[in-house]
Amino acid sequence: MEKLPSSTYKIRFNDCDLFGHLNNSRYLDYLINAREDHLSEHYALDLTTYYKNGFGWVVGSHEIAYVSPAVYNETVRIQSALLRADEQSLHVETVMTNTNGTAVKAVMRTRLIPINTKTGRRETHDAAFLAWAKTIENHGIAADIPLQQRVQELRQELTAEKRP
C-alpha cells in the first residue's frame, strides 16, 4: 500500500500575494486539500461518508515551515504521509516541493483529533479504523523530531539525490 502518495497542483493567481508568492494561509489549503485527494485516490477513503455517519476530525495543531516560496503559475508536488495513528489522534506530514522534488517549498505537521460530528465532542478511533490506519503509517519518516530538523533532513535527502 502506498505510504507516501503525491500529486501535482498549479499555484493560482487568486492564492498569491502582491509579489506573486503563494499567500501563507493558502499553503494550508493546498496541503490539506492534497491530503484529502490522497486519501480518496490512494486509499478509497471518502471523508464525506465518515461525516455522514457522525464521525470526523478537527485540527488539534498545525506546525508549518515555509522553506522557499511557491509562486504564481508554478506547478508544485505535494506528498503526504500518516506518521502515527492512535486512539486519540492522527499525525500527518505534508511536504510541498517543486515538480521534480529537488527543492522544498513547505513542510507541515498536523495533529488531527477524532470527534463525534453530532455532539462536537472528542471520540476515540474504533479498532477497525485504527487497524486500517496502522497499515498506511509511514515508519520511514521520524514522527517525533522537531519540524526544523525534519526540514534539514529533507534538504539533505534532496542534496544527496542531486549528486552524481
Image: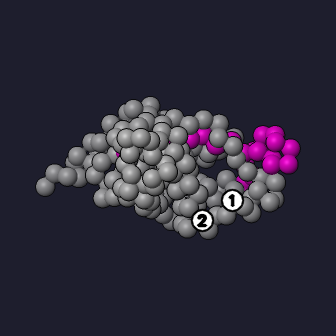
Q: Quadrant of the C terminus?
A: bottom left
- In the rendered image, residue 18, in percent from the top left (x then y), is placed at 41, 41
- Amino acid carrying label 2: it is Ser
Please tell me which residue is depicted at 49% across the width and 51% down the height of the picture: 14
- The number of numbered discs placed on residues in the rendered structure image is 2
Residues tagged 1 and 2 counted as in contact (Cβ below 8 A): yes
Res 91 label: none
The location of residue 106, given as percent across then percent down, is 41, 43
Which sits in the foreground, 25 or 8?
25
Q: Is residue 67 magenta?
A: no
Instruction: Say if residue 81 shows up in the picture.
Output: no
Question: Which residue position is annotated with label 2?
Answer: 40
Identify the residue shown where x is 37% and y is 48%: 71
Q: Is residue 75 left or right of residue 41?
A: left
Label 2 residue SS:
helix
Residue 53 vertical placement versus 59 (above, below): below
Residue 159 in view (yes/no):
yes
Amino acid type assigned to the residue bearing label 1 in the image: Leu
Separation (CA) of disc 1 from disc 2: 8 Å
Q: Which residue is mark 1?
A: 47
Name the side, left or right, on which 75 lies relative to 84: left
